[in-house]
Image (cartoon, rainbow, N blue to C red):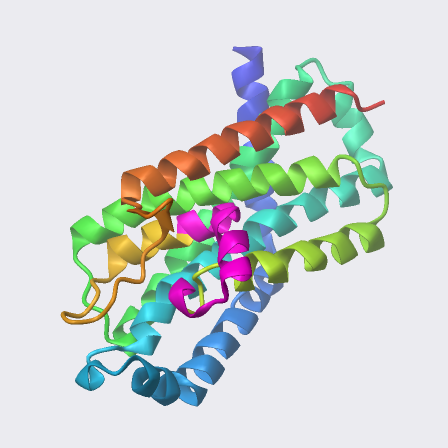
């Protein structure tokens, strides 16, 4: 019971800090919206012409699940900032000596960051009418757990990294070095079939690729007569369940490493 209460308190504290920081919420939408506007209006016609198909290919519709994935990715990984911040101000040391296990601390922080990232991903759904995607209640209910699993995996990775870093400046530099490759070496913005073979291999070892592919399959349907834009592994087209199985395995590895890292904190 004490461990569950500690887990809840850590989770609730992260949500409370997020709720009180409206600037963090608003700033998290700036870059995705810029991508949506710039890419959507700037190269949509070029991509449509490149794909052919008599105008059946809607690039903005293709890109929108990638934008949602970008929001979840950025919010999840950057949740590690709070750990570096707490370390600098001494709060993390107080948490470490509290009467609860460090496993509870790591999982509570991961759940808190994953919940916040999922909320931010859900808020992006308000832009669906502007990208002309028809979404049913069933699809919305499907993408909620997909976003949460993605957020949980990436939050655990961010917390793992933050647990080994002592300064805010170092964390921000490392996060920037991770964020952009994970976004652009994925099918978030472009179909993977247009990538060179060496880069296509990098896409397949990127866990974000499978998370975004599951969101795209849940939200959109490839137009008839067009090549598929889904992920494939060893020539096998990935289903939503297979995509999520890979993301869940990555989440299990990351949270296990985060728990181990917290256990070694002094």
Q: Is residue 12 visible?
A: no
Specify the farthest residue to the left: 224
Per the image, is 203 magenta?
A: yes
Per the image, is 77 magenta?
A: no
Picture coordinates of residue 163 (x, y %)?
Answer: 75, 35
Residue drawn at x 70%, y 59% is: 176
Which sits in the foreground, 238 or 213? 238
Assign the magenta stretch its main secondary structure: helix
Picture coordinates of residue 266 (x, y %)?
Answer: 85, 22
Count of all numbered marks drawn on residues in the image = 0
Residue drawn at x 65%, y 27% is: 257
Q: Quadrant of residue 93?
A: top right
Magenta stretch bounds:
191-211
Residue 130 relative to residue 33: left or right: left
Residue drawn at x 78%, y 57% is: 173
Is 190 above or below relative to 130? above
Picture coordinates of residue 174 (x, y %)?
Answer: 75, 53
Is 261 above or below relative to 217? above
Picture coordinates of residue 241 (x, y %)?
Answer: 29, 38
Is 71 above or below relative to 1? below
Is 149 above or below relative to 213? above
């Amino acid at each position: 019971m004490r461990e569950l209460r500690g887990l809840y308190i850590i989770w609730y504290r992260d949500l409370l800090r997020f709720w009180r920081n409206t600037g963090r919420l608003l700033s998290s939408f700036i870059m995705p919206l810029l991508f949506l506007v710039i890419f959507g209006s700037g190269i949509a016609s070029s991509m449509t012409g490149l794909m052919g198909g008599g105008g059946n290919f809607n690039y903005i519709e293709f890109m929108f699940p990638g934008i949602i994935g970008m929001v979840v990715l950025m919010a999840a990984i950057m949740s590690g900032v709070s750990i570096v911040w707490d370390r600098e101000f001494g709060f993390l040391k107080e948490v470490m000596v509290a009467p609860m296990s460090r496993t509870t601390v790591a999982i509570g922080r991961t759940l808190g960051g994953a919940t916040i990232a999922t909320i931010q991903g859900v808020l992006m759904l308000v832009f669906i009418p502007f990208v002309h995607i028809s979404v049913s209640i069933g699809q919305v209910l499907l993408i909620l757990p997909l976003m949460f699993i993605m957020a949980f995996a990436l939050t655990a990775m961010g917390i793992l990294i933050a647990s080994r870093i002592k300064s805010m400046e170092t964390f921000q530099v490392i996060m920037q070095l991770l964020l952009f490759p994970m976004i652009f070496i994925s099918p978030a913005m472009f179909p993977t079939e247009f990538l060179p073979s060496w880069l296509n291999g990098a896409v397949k070892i990127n866990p974000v690729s499978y998370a975004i592919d599951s969101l795209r399959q849940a939200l959109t349907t490839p137009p008839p007569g067009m090549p598929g834009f889904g992920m494939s592994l060893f020539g096998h087209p990935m289903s939503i369940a297979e995509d999520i199985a890979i993301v869940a395995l990555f989440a299990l590895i990351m949270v296990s490493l985060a728990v181990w890292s917290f256990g070694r904190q002094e």
